[in-house]
Image: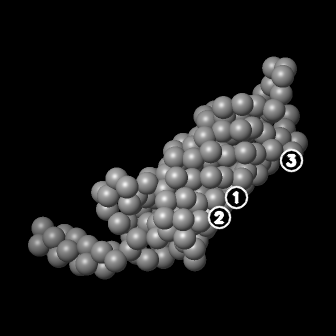
Amino acid sequence: MKKILFLSALLATLFVNSQAFTGKGDNKLYMGASFQEFATGVNIGYDVGLGENISVGINSTYALDIPNSLDADFIDRFDIKARFNANLGSVINVSDQLDVYPGLSLSLKNFGGHLGARYFFSDGFGVYSEFGVAFARYSSKRLTIAEEIHNQFVANIGMVFNL
């Protein structure tokens, strides 16, 4: 028990100076896994701070694991988004290491929204979790299952790095 308390105290002192979002000029690179009903894939993105609580970025997802019965070409598996985030870590003031960010995205497949959180263990490394939905799809007809890949509820988890 003493070892666990000592290790916890040591880690807390090491992580006290990390900040999740520093405002204008803040640069984040994140990568992780993407989970949807019809696919599991990889997610990678980059965000840059424009102001005290605003960031923009680009995000891309590629669906790797899809059902065998699903006929999905490269273009069905791939999506890229332009993103806008409202970084609320300093507003809710829970911890300097935590940033909560709702946002909007415009992609090749849809117009959507997301809600995410980043937690930094050190100045350069943290983890993120993000949930996203499509508000409007780029199709007036019913989507095929392959087109549904990036037009449904999605959960992303992974690593985030300060650059």
Q: Dot 2 surroundings within 10 Å: few (below 14), some, or many (20 or more)?
A: some
- As drawn, is 2 to the left or to the right of 22? left
Q: Residue at x 66, y 39 (%)?
A: 112
Instruction: Give the residue pinned by disc 2.
Output: 46
Q: Is residue 26 visible?
A: yes
Q: Quadrant of the N terminus?
A: bottom left
Q: In the rendered structure, which disc, 1 or 2, sits on the residue that comes first in sequence?
A: 2
Tell me if residue 86 comes above or below residue 18 in the rendering: above
Q: Nearer the viewer, mark 3 or mark 2?
A: 2
Which residue is at a point 25% across and 78% down the rendered structure image?
Answer: 13
Q: Quadrant of the C terminus?
A: bottom right
**What residue sits right under mark 3 in the picture?**
74
Residue sitting at x 79%, y 48%: 78
Image coordinates of residue 18 in percent, x first then y, are: 38, 74
Write the residue at 78% across / 39% down. 109
Q: Is residue 134 or residue 2 the one in the foreground? A: 134
> Is residue 44 visible in the rendered structure shown here?
no
Numbered label attached to residue 58: 1
Q: Nearer the viewer, residue 3 or 48?
A: 48
